[in-house]
Amino acid sequence: IVMTQTPLSSPVTLGQPASISCRSSQSLVHSDGNTYLSWLQQRPGQPPRLLIYKISNRFSGVPDRFSGSGAGTDFTLKISRVEAEDVGVYYCMQGTQSYAFGQGTKLEIK
Amino acid sequence: EVQLVQSGAEVKKPEDSVKISCKGSGYKFTSYWIGWVRQMPGKGLEWMGTIYPGDSDTRYSPSFQGQVTFSADKSITTAYLQWSSLKASDTAMYYCARLAGYCSAGICYPEYYFDYWGQGTLVTVSS
């Protein structure tokens, strides 16, 4: 399965929303009924951190300005109001058939 | 608190061998898969494979099969990634990460996303 993210770079004004899309080459619905699409954030110089799992579930400690949506092959990560600490690279990842990451989307402040 | 703590940076020459580690704590180490992820300089994340410390069952990405070896020592809750003959192209940051899961009635089931990550181990291969 190939994961394709758009855009690859996203300049955003502080306090404004941001949106990242992720498309998979095949449906991500697993045989157990779950859709294993997750979103990770990697701040500069830091390891990746889980934000969202199974499309729309926020991981422990993740601010509610982050939300995930989608189904099948098309998914979206939204940040309702971008803060300075959100700068970094965002990856989608599928775990339905083996594992694969998107190319990453760099979020930067205008 | 779940933690994965990786070993320190390595600087090696081509054809050297190296073994890096990932120590898990704060959870039942033998019940959760551990994955390894490569990040080459300035690049994205690549899944290398996973190991189940409970019985050392391993799954390798085709891109890494035969190039690396995973292992685990349950007695010290540590997973390992090793190379027998490094190449310059192995220069990268390597992360271990725990595959999520849940336990019910004493049986644990995986969920296919990585919930906790180590801090990374930088491996530099240069002559």
Image (spheres, coloured by chain):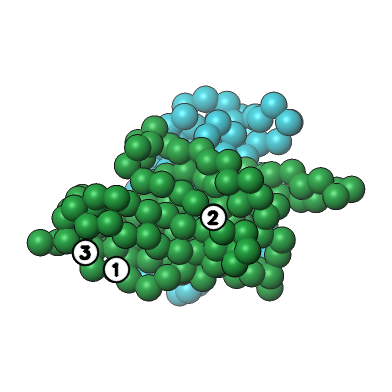
| Chain B pictured colour | green
Spatial CA span between label 1 and label 3: 6 Å
Query: Which residue in the protein does label 3 denote?
Result: B12
Q: Mark 1 lies on which chain?
A: B
Q: Which chain carries label 2?
A: B
Choose top left, top right, bottom left or bottom right for residue B123: bottom left
Q: Residue at x 67, y 55 (%)?
A: B30
- Colour cyan, chain: A
Give yes or no for contact between labels 1 and 2 (Cβ–Cβ under 8 Å).
no
Q: Where is residue B44 in the image (x, y as percent from the top left)?
A: 35, 51
Q: Is residue B21 left or right of residue B3?
A: left
Secondary structure at numbered mark 2:
strand
Q: Where is residue B115 in the image (x, y as percent from the top left)?
A: 61, 57
Spatial CA span between label 1 and label 2: 20 Å
Give yes or no for contact between labels 1 and 3 (Cβ–Cβ under 8 Å).
yes
Query: Which numbered disc, 2 or 3, marks the residue that appears first in the sequence?
Result: 3
Query: Which residue in the protein does label 2 denote?
Result: B72
